[in-house]
Image (cartoon, grey):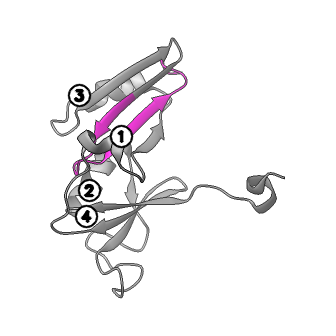
């Protein structure tokens, strides 16, 4: 039995803690093309209307969402402790034209390529940190683009 096939399971969202929702939206919009979830609008209402998560909003990229929690006084993820902690280590995006994307993000001072792995002529991965220090992996299985 394959539960994904039997029950129709698919990835829907990931939750992240950030210093500033607005700055995080701007970064993910500029770097990857995320949009605010319809009905929220910039500075708009939380889908829960406050309650338990008064500082939570959504960013969307196609069918995938980032559930963004604004948290004050949180410490950024540390690459030093990477191997010695449990939990989600990074977010991954697959891009058809990784070479073109890498050229595109070079114009931004707040996008630093930390690691580049060229696995084969057709597969590569890049790691960057977002504006909150969250590790983001960008991969392709078609290194040269279309």
The residue that mark 2 highlights is 24
Q: Compare marks 1 and 3 and give the one earlier in the sequence.
A: 1
Residue 67 position (above or below residue 103): below
The residue that mark 3 highlights is 106
Provide the secondary structure element on which disc 3 rests: loop
Residue 83: which quarter of the image?
top left
| Label 1 to label 4: alpha-carbon separation | 28 Å
64 and 74: which one is in front?
A: 74
Mark closer to the observer (1, 3): 1
Do the residues bearing badges 4 and 2 touch, measured as CB atoms within 8 Å? yes
Magenta span of residues: 126-146
Do the residues bearing badges 1 and 4 touch, measured as CB atoms within 8 Å? no
| Label 4 to label 2: alpha-carbon separation | 5 Å
Q: Position of residue 133 (x, y in %)?
A: 23, 47
The residue that mark 4 highlights is 21
Q: Compare marks 1 and 4 and give the one earlier in the sequence.
A: 4
């Amino acid at each position: 039995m394959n539960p994904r096939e039997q029950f129709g399971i698919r990835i829907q969202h990931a939750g992240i803690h950030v210093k500033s929702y607005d700055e995080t939206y701007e970064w993910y919009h500029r770097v990857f093309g995320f949009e605010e979830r319809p009905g929220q609008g910039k500075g708009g209402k939380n889908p829960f209307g406050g309650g338990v998560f008064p500082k939570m909003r959504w960013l969307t990229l196609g069918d995938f969402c980032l559930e963004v929690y604004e948290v004050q006084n949180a410490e950024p993820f540390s690459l030093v402790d990477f191997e010695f902690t449990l939990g989600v280590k990074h977010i991954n995006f697959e891009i058809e034209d990784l070479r073109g994307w890498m050229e595109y993000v070079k114009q931004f001072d707040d996008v630093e390529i930390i690691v580049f792995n060229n696995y084969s002529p057709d597969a590569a991965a890049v790691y960057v940190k977002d504006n909150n220090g969250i590790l983001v992996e960008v991969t392709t299985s078609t290194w040269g683009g279309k």
